[in-house]
Image: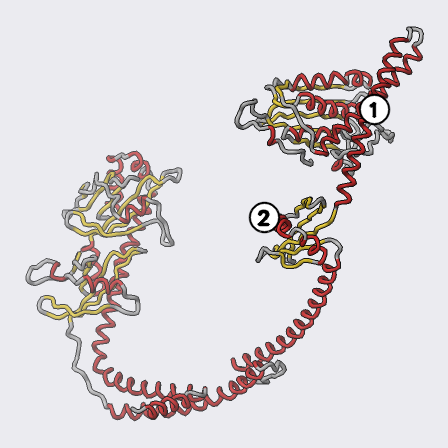
Amino acid sequence: MSADGRSQSRGLRVSLLNTIRNKIILPFLLLTILVAAVGTFVITRLVASSIQDRLTNQLIETSRAAGDSVVSWETYHLNVLRLVIFTVGVPEYIEEHNQDSLTTALLALAANQNTSLLAGIDKDGNCVAAVRLESNGDYTTGSLQGQNLSSLPMVAAVLEGQQDQFGDKYAGALRIDGQMFLITVAPVSNGSGELVGAVAIGTPLYQILQETKTSVLADIGAYQSDGQALAATYLLADGSDTSSLDITPELFAKALQNSEESTVMQTITINGREHQAAYAPLRIRRDTLGVISVSMPNTMVANLISTNRNGLSVVFSLLAVVVVLMGFAIAQNLSHPIQTLTRTAQAVTAGDLQQQSNIRSGDEIGILSRSFDHMTRTLAAQRSALEDAYQEQQREAAFLSAVLMSTADGTVVFSRQSGEDTRLNPAAETIISANYSVWLSILNELAKQVLANHKPARQTVEIDRQWFEAVAAPVLMASGNEIGVVITLRDVTDQVLTERMRTAFIMQISHELRTPLTAMKGYIDLSRTMLSEADSRIRGFLDMAGESTEVLTRMVNQILDVTEMVRGTFNIAPQMAEIPDLLRTAIQEFQETIQTKSLNLHLEIDDLPPYYGDKDRLAWAFEHLIRNACDYTMPEGHIGVFANQDNGNLVIRVCDSGVGISSRDLPRVFEQFYRGHSVAPDGTVIDVRGAGLGLFIVRAVVAAHSGNVDVRSRAGEGTEFIVILPYTRYPGSEENNLEEIEPYRSV
């Protein structure tokens, strides 16, 4: 065919199939012609094959009846097994391997139920006892007794405790002394529900087939996986064995694949006569034991009867014309609303969401049309809403951009996807441009820290004698997803310089105050020694002045130490220290206060190993804790000091029944110069003289020893301070490095 001819043929096919009407009519026409031709052929062969079909159908039904008959034997097996399992003594005999008692029980059960084979199996697969019905009608122990049957699939499945929708019993075929048996195995449990073994029941396969033959009036055969005949009911005239009935493995596999709707058929010759044989799977419960065959003599097939093909052809031709006309009417009825819907869809695709098909039929096309019209109305509403939302988002974005650009503090926004700064306001550009590479490293590290920990971070940065506070926080969507990091840069140079000046001033004034205080204390002590005993009143004034001088001296020393802590020059001098001695010495210094206020002191200090730390600094911290307990506990109150070792840590607790700390003051008690508002039970404000540095010093000393301090208190219910100090290695140990002690941490 030329190129023009192929092109014309292709154009004709496209034009014929270009409309739904033709797509419906042409298949109708082709299908009708095909059905007419096939129907004519089938009917002409129908009469000829009716007798053959009748025989085939009978064989199929007979094979199913034979299979059902074999399965009924499984029901008989299950009933007997239930009787055996629940017979008193059987589980115990199997568990105890009591062969004689089990044999007696099985013999009685087998004779009572007319069973051919019963066996008891322990949980290892060994046959404890078995009884078998011989051909002479007597029961013997049989050849199974003493054998290990754990290799049999049905025995192994039961002993392994397998169970599915069919239950926990399994079936199979077993050859015993040359004779095939249908075996069913069930588990046996003791009184505690523990599996102790199994019980097996068997019936000769030949006996099953003979009784099945009687019920279905056809010869029966059973085959195993290689196609070998296990048993059959045929009477072979030449005296040959069942091996002449063997089938091919291919036929066996094909028979196993059959369903209830189809059966494998084959013509076989037995005793010189042809038989029609049907093959089907032999299934019992979940198990496929092989293939079963049912056969009948092939003497019922009659000669083919011819039919009038011309008459049938006319009938089918008329039928084809009627079908085509009906198809045309149906196609016309369907194609018109579809064409309308198509035109509407094309208009919507072009952007006209106001178009409606307005098809109101009650069939599926009408439902589709109404759904399509509803969809276009919804799309129009959603597009309008999206346009409004977009405009609102544009206004909000413009507002946020204006706020960001006009903020006095520097602002840097990092994107989580790119990891780079996606936006900087003018203040941030001014700050970063001076040292771009340094700032880029700092900001990247801060952003990574926030993204890794999922919480804000803060860092103070010094660059070219300028100090900046960088505060980073994750940028969260409404759903909680992190999309980036925002970092605020604030110039805190003035605050840092002011703080340093304040610290320097305090340190300088403290040093200046120490000199006159030392002189005052010296002159007071000298005056006290020069007074006679008669001048007791003046001596009392001098004692009061001396105590005030000591308080001022202690406050000045505390301020100097705190200044070192703030400046980072606070150091410790570790040495071996006896913690119990330090605690008792600190308590002894306040013994007079304890006696004056009639305080009840309770001590529980264990024998602790030496602690490697700064003895003076630790004693100083303990004194502050005990002083607080004495100062804020009312007369006749209770004070407790406890020290013990727990999980390699030194734990020291100082408790009191004093006025406690309010929830407002509790978070700030460790701040320097902070003094809470303590009130006695009678409403009197407790004003203890001091600079508000005691607990700040305690925290700094504990932190210098890599420890932690915590406080638990409630107003009016007392206070408990808990100090935890880790035991460190002795000097010279590779793991002991005092330079690794971290600075103090906030509690």
- Quarter of the figure with the C terminus: top right
Q: Amino acid at mark 1?
A: Leu
Q: Residue at x 69, y 45 (%)?
A: 464
In the image, 321: left or right of 453? left
Query: Disc 1 marks which residue?
Result: 552
Tell me residue 442's x, y (percent).
63, 48
| 184 or 358, nearer to the observer | 358
| Residue 571 seen in this snapshot | yes
Identify residue type, mark 2: Ala
Where is 520 relative to 647, above or below? Answer: above
Residue identifier under label 2: 452
Nearest to viewer (mark 1 / mark 2): 1
**What is the x, y in percent for residue 496?**
75, 42
Indicate the secondary structure of the residue bearing disc 2: helix
| x then y, percent, for residue 148 | 23, 41
Report the side of 281 relative to 675 (left or right).
left
Decide which of tag 1 and tag 2 comes sooner along the chain. 2
Residue found farthest to the top: 533
Give the quadrant of residue 531: top right
Pick the front one: 191 or 404:
404
Task: Name the side, left or right, on which 228 lies relative to 423.
Answer: left
| Residue 517 sits above or below residue 30 on the image | above
Location of the N terminus by quadrant is bottom left
Please give left or right for residue 27 compared with residue 656 in the image.
left
Residue extending farthest to the left is 238
Q: Is 670 above or below relative to 602?
A: below
At mark 1, the secondary structure is helix
